[in-house]
Amino acid sequence: MEIISQGAEAIIVKEKNNVLKKRIKKSYRIQEIDERLRKTRTKRETKILERAKDLIPVPKILDSCDKDMTIKMEFIDGLKLSEVLDSLKNKYEIAELIGKQIAILHNNNIIHGDLTTSNMLLKKDKLYFIDFGLSYIDEKTEHKAVDLHLIKQALESKHYLYFEDLFKSVLKGYRNNSNNYEAIMQRLLKVETRGRYKRKLH
Ligand SMILES: Nc1ncnc2c1ncn2[C@@H]1O[C@H](COP(=O)(O)OP(=O)(O)O)[C@@H](O)[C@H]1O
Ligand SMILES: [Mg+2]
């Protein structure tokens, strides 16, 4: 057993070829609210991973328990995209793939809810999306536009040297695969002029 990540919400433990994602208690939250949140996020993540697995690369679920707030899934032996994107020769191709995979999720009304390059793992030419704890099913363009706004902000803050061309490539991949590109782009403009949904930097 080896701890591979200890984030704000969850601890990730590696066990042979699997990982356990366990949502840990937050003592600053009222106990009942904390339990409910952790349960909901574990359930959501399991449900969406099951749906997404036929659409884009995601870790396979092996077991899940919303009582223990734990998900057992396949270990992806890849690189965290946030750490390598800037130095990749094919960074714009990968950015296009990000856009393509977001479009495929959105065509199926899956909103990721936490799109950052820290929630993407690159293994050879496959780009795995992970961390679906804030995901949900919704068909509205508003939610799809906000998802795009989040990845835009993530690129701007973590990959600022290449931000403009990276985001252009994301949109290219999105446009080529989305079933509702124009409407979602119009909505994105509205979201941005409204200026809500600023990601908290942490
Ligand atoms: N299935 C997996 N295979 C390999 N590494 C993983 C897997 N799931 C999570 N990780 C690693 O753990 C980190 C945190 O996992 P994540 O699901 O994003 O939880 P958090 O809510 O803490 O961000 C990821 O950035 C990744 O490095
Ligand atoms: Mg994460």
Image (cartoon, rainbow, N blue to C red):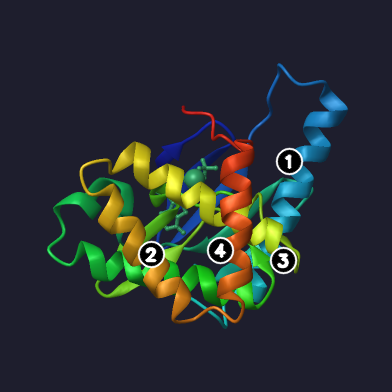
Query: Relative to 17, does residue 114 appear above or below in the rendering?
Result: above
| Mark sitting earlier along the chain (2/3) | 3
Disc 2 from disc 4: Cα separation: 13 Å
Disc 4 from disc 3: Cα separation: 28 Å
SS for dot 1: helix
SS for dot 2: helix
Please give the residue where the numbered disc 1 appears in the rendered image.
Answer: 38
Label 2 Cα crowd, 10 Å radius (few <14 / some 14-19 / many 20+): many
Determine the residue positioned at 46% across, 51% down: 151
Please give the residue where the numbered disc 3 appears in the rendered image.
Answer: 47
Q: Amino acid at mark 4?
A: Met
| Residue 4's disc number | none
Q: Position of residue 6 (x, y in %)?
A: 47, 34
| Mark sitting earlier along the chain (3/1) | 1
Disc 3 from disc 1: Cα separation: 14 Å
| Mark sitting earlier along the chain (1/4) | 1
Please give the residue where the numbered disc 4 appears in the rendered image.
Answer: 185
Label 3 Cα crowd, 10 Å radius (few <14 / some 14-19 / many 20+): some
Q: Amino acid at mark 2?
A: Val
Number of labelled discs?
Answer: 4
Disc 2 from disc 3: Cα separation: 26 Å
Label 1 Cα crowd, 10 Å radius (few <14 / some 14-19 / many 20+): many
Disc 1 from disc 4: Cα separation: 33 Å
Q: Which quadrant of the structure image shows residue 71?
A: bottom right
Query: Relative to 101, does residue 88 appear above or below in the rendering?
Result: above
| Mark sitting earlier along the chain (4/3) | 3
Q: Position of residue 109 (x, y in %)?
A: 69, 71
